[in-house]
Image: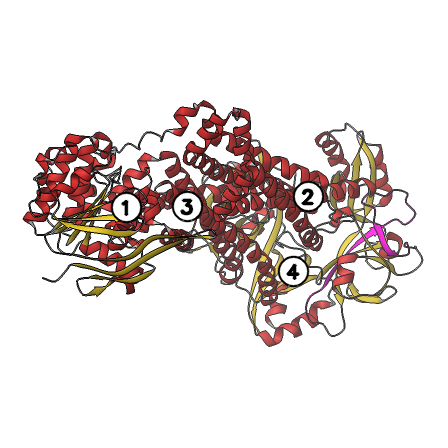
């Protein structure tokens, strides 16, 4: 019979229980969907790495003959080694203006179980006989290519046709970025092509040499030891860099994504389940108090403690099971579109979601665990009640003065309703704390969300609109003489300004810290590349030292005045230790760089007036002309049109807005649920007082104001506390998100606080209006007839 | 003299599941300024229902009810709220004070919403609780709480004071004290006081006594020489 009572009780307060279930559902949806996506990614990553024999180490050299590379096999700790020629080439698609690049990666079709082997999705394996390639599936799909179609590329200044005989992918390019300053893969404009070395070497003048080496380690071998053993062997061939798997861009970004997913899947659900547990606790505690008489009667009838307790626990059980099942199922359902979303960024086989009974069970268990624990805490008061005592009304609530009354000025300012509200807050401290935490959570989640929105915009648009203000950037395949190229570009029609740039890969060391970065040499009077300080003031590139970014300073443990050891294969005498002093630290959100005046840098390198790229200010109409002119030049590796980059970025930001919207919605729903529930509980708890006020002739609005005053009063302080809270969240977020590609700023904008304030206030206000409807339904006669 | 309350052919029926309960049947009555009336009757006779309807807390199912010239049977919730706010004072059996407001604040709460309130201090003095003004309800005895409730009702300066079993929860001494205050209020301020009780002894202090039985007005007695409350015993 008692379950009927439960269902009726639940129905009576359906709004409040529904809100609790919704919070549980949100928490579990995040838990299930994120965990499942994480599992899917991890599983497919592991099997892909294993099946395709993903490399443990990566080496870039100028040029090294294959026979020499093979000898590296004998180095202790190395399991297998494989040389490759890796080159970026431009693709000529008929009727398309924008820059499209392919990275040609040479392979040996005869090799068994090659390192970073290509998994063939369609078509046939490569042969050494003709100009055939395997192309990566993302590029293939994005550009609507067909098998056996030929695509034209520019290799070494000559137009060449390559036949697509297959489609495949490799673990090396799961997350394929062309340059380290790209944020997202862009398969329309950048793809990977796998080509037999015997074929590829005919396209380039290097002939018999390779420029890229990958290797795997023997089980138990230490990477750092192997690296030290490799270095002297590689030096004669122009060693550029050598790095382990963990620093490989695609692997690094995938790992970071997994870490982020894991953190979210753990923290957010805990937060939501705690909130739901707290609401459930308060509601059940209130119900047990309210139904004291009924409990007394049940006890008098001879119901055991266990039977009564399990009756009240059945509320928590019902909520827990409902929340768990709905949250679990919705979460599993959500994992499908999520996984699909990840498929667009991460190119791996087997990346699909499937129904997981395990996560459904886990969801239900989690939900039940929280609900039953909270429920028991709320109900355990039943156990100590004696039947006779239970049937008597509880001792009347005691009115007490609060410490706030000592602040006379404040106290005298309050209306009597205000005074009631303030005393209520201290009368029911746990409820007040709950409201406080709830509003603080809502506010800080919203503040964080909007800040992230603001900041990511700043991160991207500042870089393109304030820092890199050139129209076109021409990158060279190899460093060339600055003056010569400048002169040539200056004569190009439509070009009004040319500035040289030197991008030098260096290793910066300070004490035991070290970091590989690109040192940018920029002309002193540059107007096309503006280095900005925190307040957007222009800073000149220094002649006597380095400007470094804040994040780089942190990574190197360096500050202004620190002398950094600079190593670079581009320094004339690479073995000689050279130092540069840090003369300034600047914020940098995109990329991780050090800056210097280009002339001083050239002097420092001792290789003459070298430049690696040129920034141009030019007429928009002439850009296409420039691209056509230099597209075929072997000396030019890329021509970047700034408006194209900006447009691409804007497009990619759209997906980010979706996430922001969902986060904001979660914040609003939580705020609403907390305020609505606490209002409903307060209403039922204080129906007597409120009805008395109505009898006195107060309007429902005036009566509601007692409750709302309390909530606003707590709300103001909670929102104030939310300000540092969002800051802490943002710093945490920034630390987990920031990497060498982008650094998330941590200064929250005033406008995001303002928006957070208004949205929080709106969700409080709406919840109060809903609660207000219940006041109008209070029956004065019934309430006042009974003794409290 | 114009009556302050006029009830004509007043009916109240409740739908309790499939049964229709008739709480009031064809009530006709008039209350005048400055008189103290007692409504007597056993439980279930409809006393409280009548009082609630007169006080604007409930609506009649049929019939007419006027406060002076205002037709209350046509009033909406908002108009009833303002009627309660400005013209009616209530005293209940169980005081219904705000537990977390002091005696003074409880009275002030009601005074502040009235259009022509009486001074809060004066009301507390009148009920003999000036020295308890800063006490919370839980620090007062039942009689004292009821006096605060009375001061709260009076502070609004209502034209009519409605009391539902005001002495029901009080001992004899405290009851007499409260009754004296009612009498005093109706005489000094020329206000109408209506007291509901099932205690017949209290009827002795009234100017008129209405007897209610099974929802009907059984009879009305005029008391030419009402007893002063201190001479009432039970």
Q: How far apart are marks 2 and 1 (CA)?
A: 54 Å
Of all residues shown, which one is farthest toward the front?
B219
Specify the quadrant of the image occupied by residue B148: top left
Do the residues at pointers 4 and 1 share their chain?
yes
Do the residues at pointers 2 and 3 share their chain?
yes
- SS label for mark 3: helix
Can residue A513 be seen here? The reply is yes
Q: How crowded is mark 4: few (under 14 residues within 10 Å), some or many (20 or more)?
A: many
Mark 1 vs mark 3: which is more N-terminal? Answer: 3
Do the residues at pointers 4 and 2 share their chain?
yes
Q: Do the residues labelled 4 and 2 touch (CB within 8 Å)?
A: no
Q: Name the residue under label 3.
A: A680
- Nearer the observer: mark 1 or 3; the answer is 1
Q: In this view, does B100 lie to the left or right of B125?
A: right
Can residue A586 be seen here? The reply is no
Q: Mark 4 lies on which chain?
A: A
Q: Name the residue under label 4.
A: A475
Q: Distance between the residues labelled 4 and 1?
A: 80 Å
Specify the quadrant of the image occupied by residue B168: top left
Mark 3 vs mark 4: which is more N-terminal? Answer: 4
Q: Is residue A233 left or right of residue A689?
A: right
Q: Mark 1 points at which residue?
A: A692
What label sits on residue A36 in the rendered view? Answer: 2
Quadrant where the N terminus of chain A lies? top right
């Amino acid at each position: 019979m008692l379950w009927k009572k439960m269902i009726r009780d639940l129905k009576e307060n359906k709004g409040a229980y529904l809100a609790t279930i919704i919070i549980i559902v949100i928490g579990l949806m995040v838990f299930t969907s994120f965990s499942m996506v994480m599992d899917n990614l991890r599983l497919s990553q592991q099997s892909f790495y294993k099946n395709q024999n993903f490399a443990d180490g990566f080496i870039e050299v100028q040029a090294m003959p294959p026979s020499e590379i093979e000898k590296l096999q004998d180095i202790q700790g190395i399991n297998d080694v494989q040389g490759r020629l890796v080159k970026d080439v431009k693709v000529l698609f008929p009727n398309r203006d924008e820059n499209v690049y392919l990275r040609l990666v040479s392979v040996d079709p005869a090799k068994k179980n090659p390192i970073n082997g290509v998994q063939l999705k369609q078509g046939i394996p490569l042969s050494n006989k003709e100009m055939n390639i395997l192309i990566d599936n993302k590029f293939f799909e994005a550009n609507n290519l067909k098998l056996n179609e030929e695509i034209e590329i520019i290799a070494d200044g000559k137009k060449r046709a390559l036949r697509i005989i297959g489609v495949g992918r490799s673990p090396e390019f799961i997350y394929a970025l062309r340059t380290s300053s790209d944020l997202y893969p862009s398969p329309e404009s950048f793809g990977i092509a796998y080509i037999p070395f015997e074929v590829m070497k005919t396209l380039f003048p290097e002939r018999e040499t390779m420029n890229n080496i990958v290797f795997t380690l023997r089980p138990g071998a230490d990477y750092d030891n192997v690296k030290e053993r490799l270095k002297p062997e590689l030096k004669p061939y122009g060693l550029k860099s050598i790095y382990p798997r963990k620093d490989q861009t695609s692997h690094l970004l995938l790992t970071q994504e997994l870490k982020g997913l894991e953190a979210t899947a753990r923290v957010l659900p805990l937060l939501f389940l705690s909130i739901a547990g707290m609401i459930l606790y308060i509601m059940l505690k209130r119900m047990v108090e309210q139904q004291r008489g009924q409990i007394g009667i049940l006890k008098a009838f001879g119901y055991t403690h266990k039977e009564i307790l399990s009756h009240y626990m059945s509320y928590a059980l019902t909520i827990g099971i409902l929340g768990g099942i709905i949250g679990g199922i919705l979460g599993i359902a959500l994992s499908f579109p999520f996984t699909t979303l990840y498929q667009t960024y991460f190119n791996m086989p087997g990346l699909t979601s499937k129904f997981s009974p395990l996560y459904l069970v886990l969801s239900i268990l989690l939900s039940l665990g929280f609900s039953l624990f909270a429920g028991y805490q709320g109900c355990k008061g039943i156990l100590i009640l004696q039947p006779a005592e239970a049937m008597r009304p509880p001792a009347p609530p005691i009115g007490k003065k609060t410490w706030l009354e000592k602040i006379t000025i404040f106290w005298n300012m309050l209306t009597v309703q205000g005074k009631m509200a303030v005393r209520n807050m201290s009368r029911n401290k746990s409820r007040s704390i709950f409201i406080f935490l709830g509003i603080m959570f809502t506010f800080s989640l919203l503040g964080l969300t909007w800040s992230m929105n603001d900041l990511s915009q700043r991160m991207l648009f500042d870089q393109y609109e304030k820092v890199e203000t050139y129209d076109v950037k021409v990158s060279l395949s190899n460093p060339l003489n600055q003056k010569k190229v400048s002169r040539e570009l200056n004569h190009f029609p439509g070009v009004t300004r040319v500035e040289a740039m030197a991008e030098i890969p260096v290793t910066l060391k300070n004490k035991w810290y070290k970091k590989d970065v690109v040192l940018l040499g920029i002309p002193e009077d540059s107007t096309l590349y503006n280095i900005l300080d925190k307040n957007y003031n222009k800073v000149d590139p220094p002649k006597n030292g380095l400007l470094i970014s804040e994040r780089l300073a942190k990574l190197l443990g360096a500050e202004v005045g620190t002398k950094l050891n600079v190593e670079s294969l581009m320094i004339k005498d690479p073995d000689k230790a050279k130092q540069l002093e840090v003369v300034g630290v600047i914020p940098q959100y995109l990329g991780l760089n050090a800056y210097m005046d280009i002339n001083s840098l050239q002097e420092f390198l001792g290789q003459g007036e070298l430049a690696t790229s040129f920034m141009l200010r030019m007429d928009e109409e002439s850009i296409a002309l420039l691209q056509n002119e230099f597209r075929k030049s072997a000396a030019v590796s890329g021509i970047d049109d700034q408006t194209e980059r900006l447009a691409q970025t804007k497009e990619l930001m759209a997906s980010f807005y979706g996430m922001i919207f969902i986060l904001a919605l979660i914040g609003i729903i939580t705020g609403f649920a907390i305020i609505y529930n606490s209002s409903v509980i307060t209403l039922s708890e204080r129906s007597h007082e409120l009805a008395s006020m109505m009898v006195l002739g107060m309007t429902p609005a005036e009566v509601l104001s007692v409750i709302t005053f309390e909530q606003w009063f707590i709300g103001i302080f909670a929102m104030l506390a939310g300000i540092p809270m969002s800051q802490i969240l943002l710093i945490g977020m920034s630390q987990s998100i920031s990497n060498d590609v982008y650094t998330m700023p941590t200064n929250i904008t005033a406008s995001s606080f303002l928006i957070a304030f208004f949205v929080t206030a709106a969700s409080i206000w709406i919840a109060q209006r809903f609660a207000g409807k219940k006041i109008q339904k209070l029956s004065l006669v019934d309430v006042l007839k009974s003794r409290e | 003299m114009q009556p302050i309350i006029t009830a004509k052919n007043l009916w109240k029926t409740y739908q309790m599941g499939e049964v229709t309960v008739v709480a009031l049947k064809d009530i006709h009555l008039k209350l005048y300024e400055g008189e103290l009336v007692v409504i007597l009757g056993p439980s279930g006779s409809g006393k409280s229902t009548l009082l609630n309807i007169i006080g604007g807390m409930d609506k009649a199912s049929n019939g007419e009810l006027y406060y002076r010239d205002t037709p209350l049977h046509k009033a909406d919730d908002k108009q009833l709220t303002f009627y309660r706010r400005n013209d009616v004072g209530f005293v209940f059996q169980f005081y219904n004070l705000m537990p977390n407001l002091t005696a003074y604040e409880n009275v002030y709460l009601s005074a502040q919403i009235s259009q022509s309130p009486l001074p809060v201090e004066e009301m507390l003095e009148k009920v003999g609780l000036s020295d308890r003004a800063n006490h919370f309800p839980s620090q007062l005895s039942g009689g004292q709480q009821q006096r605060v409730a009375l001061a709260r009702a009076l502070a609004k300066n209502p034209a009519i004071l409605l009391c539902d079993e005001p002495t029901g929860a009080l001992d004899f001494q405290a009851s007499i004290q409260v009754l004296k205050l009612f009498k005093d209020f109706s005489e000094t301020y020329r206000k109408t006081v209506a007291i509901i009780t099932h205690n017949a002894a209290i009827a002795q202090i009234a100017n008129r006594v209405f007897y209610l039985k099974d929802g009907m007005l059984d009879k009305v007695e005029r008391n030419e020489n009402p007893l002063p409350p201190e001479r009432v015993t039970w």
